[in-house]
Amino acid sequence: MEDIARLKKQAALKALTFVEDDMLLGLGTGSTTAFFIDALGAALREGRLQGIRGVPTSEATAARARELGIPLVSLSQVEYLDLAVDGADEVDPQWNLIKGLGRALLREKIVEIHARRFLVIVDDSKLVQRLGRGPLPVEIVPFEAEATVRWLNTLDCQADFWYEEDGSRVVTDNGNYLALCRFPEGIADAYALARALADRPGVVEHGLFLDMATGVISAGRDGVRVLERER
């Protein structure tokens, strides 16, 4: 675990080198992004960066940013973000992602779709040949949630509510439930699945982030790799 944490921190520190003064940043959620936010706060305190403003993707990220003195704004106050930085649960060779195990997929997608550049920071264990190695989180409304989960099970997956350790259902910052969909053979067609989920009443959002990432920073035992699409 210490080795994974070290790699996450390496990817996060590399992402910080893409941040310039006066940028508007999308601040992701999760264990890898936490290293980035901590490093960003330190850079502001030490005067290595200035004029930064961030849009947080969760209440936890907002609280941590305030503790570190990172100025925050909302999307209603800006037209676009210069850069968004966030982690991912899975990254395929086309840089399509599964996100949401940090419980913030809806807010992450809302924020990151406004970014001119979206850098994904991961350790090499998150790189997959096909999405669906792990669960796909899906955010659903509480009304008749059992019926929505029943429908999710028709999508060639095994779906159930995400539960806390005490047996209660996981609730997002938006007051919705999260379901976890497991695909024994992986996701055959991520685009078709995304369309089906988007069209279903009761599904608020899903953890498939397709064609959104403009770059991936991946840290492994052989070092840190930076891949960016041509701008």
Image (tube, rainbow, N blue to C red):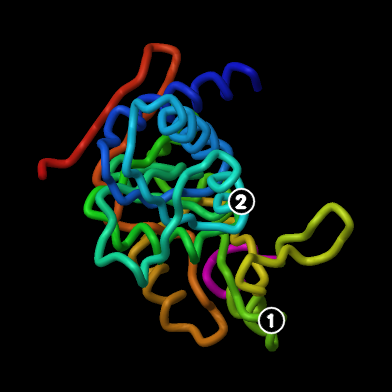
- Predominant SS along the magenta part: loop
Question: Is residue 183 among the parts visible in the rendering?
Answer: no
**Residue at 37% across / 14% down in the picture?**
223
Residue behind mark 1: 142
**What x and y, as percent, mark residue 142?**
69, 81
Tell me the distance, in whole angstroms, between the alpha carbons under discs 2 and 1: 26 Å
Q: Secondary structure at mark 1?
A: loop
Extent of the magenta region: 153-160
Q: Is residue 225 left or right of residue 123?
A: left
Q: Amino acid at mark 1?
A: Pro
Q: Secondary structure at mark 2?
A: helix
**What x and y, as percent, mark residue 195?**
37, 74
Q: Amino acid at mark 2?
A: Ala
Question: Is residue 131 among the parts visible in the rendering?
Answer: yes
Q: Is residue 158 magenta?
A: yes
The quarter of the displayed image where residue 202 is located = bottom right
Residue behind mark 2: 63
